[in-house]
Image (cartoon, grey):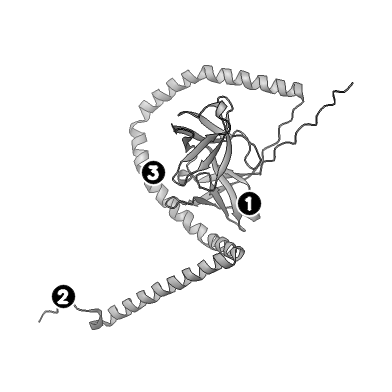
Amino acid sequence: MASPRNRRPGYSRRAQYSLFIGYVIAIAGVLVGAILLLISKLDPPAFSALRAGTAEVTAPVSWGVGSVVRGIGAIPGWVGSYFGVHGENARLKEQVQRQEQVLLKARAIAYENIRLKKLLNMREPAIEDIINARLVSSSASSTRRYALVYAGIAQGVHAGMPVRGPDGLVGRVIEAGPDTARVLMIIDPESVIPVRRLKDGAPGFAAGRGDGLLEVRPIAMTTGQFAPGDILVTSGTGGIFPPNVPVAKVTERSRDSALAMPLARPDALDFATVMKTYLPPPPAPAQDTRP
């Protein structure tokens, strides 16, 4: 006689064991989560140390899984690039020709700036790179945006240091462990960066929104609103972030602010550069003009 299809787990010892183990795992997970929540509320320093230790253990696994995922996701792009390489080559050659005059003018302006600074006896502060480190992971599904770099206190990385990629600013280190560091990305709602417009130096602030975009507001309304296409770079005001690091490109303008897309894409980066915290030069002493 054929066995009934809808037999309950009580008829099978294997099913009973599986059901029991599932309950045990679920209860253990709830207890661990409750304990971690209590530690985070009652003893934040201990929770930070625990989180740093977990990051040290999971960093190699996260890096390996992330490399495989990025490799698989890049396959369609490789195929598309192979078939579109000839058209892209012609477009780039045309773009290079258009930019030659702009490049010559920029070189002339840069040379003139150097000459004027020498006449004024101005000295630019040095911007030092601490280390080029692997970007292990970055959060993309929550409103809080963090990244993890595979370098920590042992490599000279400390909280407050800015982090950038080849295309622009990524964020700043907020927590450093022995060999890993946690980075607050510029798109996080807690991130606010002093910026300036590249073409005329109009100052403003770029604040994260948590959805992958930045909200940009000018400091003074007299400088005019930021418009689509404007490139924003760090201004260096207040320290931490060195000046002239690319930040974002404005994509949309609203009544009193603008939306901008970050130039750096942490989800597509393999390596990031941790820089020394920028300290702006002290103001020059006032000259005594009395006779």
Task: Bin the neighbour count of mark 3 within 10 Å (Cα to Cα): few under 14, some 14-19, many 20 and up.
Answer: few
Which comes sooner in the sequence, label 1 or label 2? 2
Q: Is mark 2 on a helix, strand or loop?
A: loop
* Residue 214: image location, x then y, percent: 49, 40
Report, in whole angstroms, how far the alpha carbon at label 3 lies from the one at label 2. Answer: 45 Å
Q: Is residue 212 left or right of residue 23?
A: right
- Res. 204 in view: yes
Q: In this view, does 188 lie above or below 77?
A: below
Q: In this view, does 113 lie above or below 33?
A: above
- For the residue pair 250 and 127, the one nearer the viewer reads as 250
Q: Give the residue number, with chain letter if any, for mark 3.
A: 74
Which comes sooner in the sequence, label 3 or label 2? 2
**In this view, the mark in front (3 or 2):** 2
- For the residue pair 76 and 280, the one nearer the viewer reads as 280
Q: Give the residue number, with chain letter if any, for mark 1.
A: 159
Circle on res. 5: 2
Q: Is residue 91 above or below residue 134?
A: above
Query: Residue reaching furthest left?
Result: 1
* Residue 107: image location, x then y, percent: 60, 20
**In this view, the mark in front (1 or 2):** 1
Residue visible at 44% across and 53% down? 142
Amino acid identity at mark 2: Arg
